[in-house]
Image (cartoon, grey):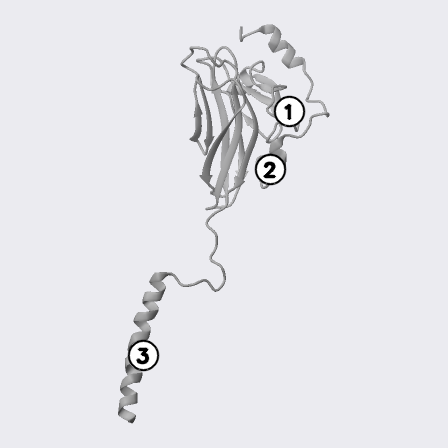
Amino acid sequence: MKKSVLSLSLVLLCPALPSFATSSICDAAPGNIVTNCGFEAGTYTSTIGGNTNTSVPVGWTPSAGYDLEPGFNNVGGHANSGTYGQQIGNDDGQPVPTLSQTLTDVTGASYAGTLFVSYGASGTSDTNVFFDVTIDGADVVSLGNTAPGTFTEYTFSFTGTGSDVLSFGGNTSPSEWYVDDIDVSESAGPPAPPVGATPEPSSLILLATASGPLFYMRQRLARRSS
């Protein structure tokens, strides 16, 4: 069973993550702007609406739904890489647990994102299952009960506004979603034209149009002087 007073008590008694956490693959991703992308940087305690969760990943902000069920929503040992990953997902009908953080990016720049997700109850018939990744509230990744039970990479993209909110979360019974290795990096745009580039065809036409009258004027002046 998903709900368990015993499991809840054990989570509340767990100390902060030990110091022997290893690096995740996302830590080495060049240009990654996500803080604590692999959930290896430790945890802190949050209390919302009278509910306390002692396992909130550093750098991330929980919702009321996350604090509601510490036994479901916590940093644990099911990871895609490194030592730890993020477990998240309340029962059907409960408030949706989410984690979010504000990304500082470049206005107008293109960003590519990836993350690894595993569905802990893969193969069940529960159709109320969902998991979403959002940027400023707009879905960029949406998963359901057909998601695989192994860590699978998902991708998304968006245009930066200077400050964008990344969020993920969802509900499921009887198990949770597992998330790890979130990478958001600026993607390469169209290359700048090299110095001294050959003019575009439209530029050549404009040049020909402008130089035509000069050619005929020179011919007329040559005739007059002869």
Q: Nearer the viewer, mark 2 or mark 1?
A: 2
The kind of residue on which mark 3 rests is Leu
Q: Is residue 95 left or right of residue 48?
A: left
The kind of residue on which mark 2 rests is Ala
Residue 217, placed above or below residue 157: below
Tag 2–tag 3 contact (CB < 8 Å) = no
At numbered mark 2, what does the secondary structure look like: helix, strand or loop? loop
Q: Earlier in the sequence, mark 3 or mark 1?
A: 1
At numbered mark 1, what does the secondary structure look like: helix, strand or loop? strand
In the rendered image, residue 158, in percent from the top left (x then y), is placed at 45, 38
Q: Nearer the viewer, mark 2 or mark 3?
A: 3
Q: Is residue 201 visible?
A: yes
In the rendered image, residue 160, in percent from the top left (x then y), is placed at 47, 42
In the rendered image, residue 191, in percent from the top left (x then y), is placed at 48, 52
The kind of residue on which mark 1 rests is Tyr
Question: Camera-side residue: 167 or 65?
Answer: 167
The local crowd at label 3, few if under 14, some if 14 to 19, many if 20 or more residues have their Cα within 10 Å, is few
Q: Residue furthest bottom?
A: 226
Residue matched to label 2: 29
Residue 22, placed above or below residue 220: above
Residue matched to label 1: 44
Q: Earlier in the sequence, mark 2 or mark 1?
A: 2
In the rendered image, residue 177, in percent from the top left (x then y), is placed at 52, 19
Residue in view at x 56 percent, y 16 percent: 51
Q: Can you tell which mark lies on residue 214?
A: 3
